[in-house]
Structure formats: structure tokens, C-alpha cells
Amino acid sequence: MRRLGVSVTLLVMVIVLMATTASAQQVPVKDVHSVLEASLKAMGGTNLKTIQYSARGWNSRVGQTYTLNEDWPKYEVADYTRVIDYDAGHVRGLLKPLRPIVAPQPLTMP
């Protein structure tokens, strides 16, 4: 009897999950478009021409390891700035590295 109760509960949960998934997939495209347009307008992006963002942290050179057992070398980045100009179709990124966080090790031959 207990097993039947668990099976019924599980069946009800699956039906509810399928119903909520199906209802979530029936969002009209017009509603999504209007939501995106409203959020763009609220953020002041209707006349957006350029975006600039800056950061600092670390960067690594993918695939530049000395052995298979170590991470990629990381380099501290003092300043990173990227500017995207939509009118000109231009992207410019400036990266000022400071120094390697982990000093590169020379390759040794056996």
C-alpha cells in the first residue's frame, strides 16, 4: 500500500512538471520582444552608440603549459579596457599585464 502511495505521488509530480514546462514554452514572441524593448528603454539603451568596460585581475595563455600536470600560466593584469563602437563596427581592447603570477619553468629533457 505504501509503495502505491509513493508511485502515485511520483506520477503527480511528473505530470505537474510536464504541465509547467509546456506552459512555459507557450510564451508568445510578441510578449518577449516587448519585454526586451521595455528593459532596453528602462536602461537607457535605445540610443546606445558605445560601451566601455574596464577590469583588473589575471589572464592566462590557453594551451601554453610546460607539462600536462600543471595549469596554464597566469599573468596578473593591471588594467584591461574594452571599447565597443556600434556605429563604426569597431572593437578595441587594451591589456596591460604586470608580471606572471607563477614563473614559467624551463623544459627539462629526461
Image (spheres, rainbow, N blue to C red):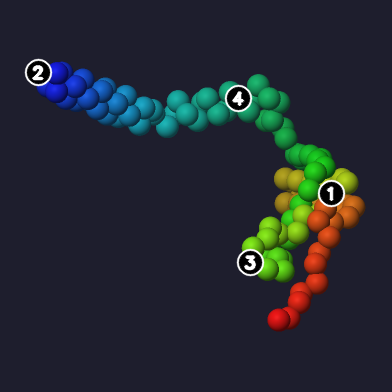
Q: According to the image, label 1 marks what residue?
A: 77
Q: According to the image, label 2 marks what residue?
A: 1
Q: CA distance from mark 1 to mark 4?
A: 33 Å
The label nearer to you, 2 versus 1, is 2
Proximity of marks 2 and 3: CB atoms separated by less than 8 Å:
no
Proximity of marks 3 and 4: CB atoms separated by less than 8 Å:
no
Q: Amino acid at mark 2?
A: Met
Q: According to the image, label 4 marks what residue?
A: 39
- The answer to whether residue 94 is visible is no
Q: Earlier in the sequence, mark 1 or mark 3?
A: 3
Classify residue 52 as left or right of residue 32.
right
Q: Earlier in the sequence, mark 4 or mark 2?
A: 2
Q: Amino acid at mark 4?
A: Ser
Q: Residue at x 55, y 29 (%)?
A: 36
Q: CA distance from mark 2 to mark 1?
A: 65 Å
Q: CA distance from mark 4 to mark 2?
A: 53 Å
Classify residue 103 as left or right of residue 65.
right
Which structural element holds mark 3? loop
Q: CA distance from mark 3 to mark 4?
A: 46 Å
Which structural element holds mark 1? strand
Q: Amino acid at mark 1?
A: Val
Frontmost residue, 77 versus 82: 77
Q: CA distance from mark 2 to mark 3?
A: 57 Å
Proximity of marks 1 and 4: CB atoms separated by less than 8 Å:
no
Name the spot of residue 84 as percent of width and height, x first. 76, 46
Frontmost residue, 53 versus 8: 8
In this rendering, the answer to whether 68 lies above or below 99 is: below
Frontmost residue, 35 versus 97: 97
Q: Earlier in the sequence, mark 2 or mark 3?
A: 2
Q: According to the image, label 3 marks what residue?
A: 68
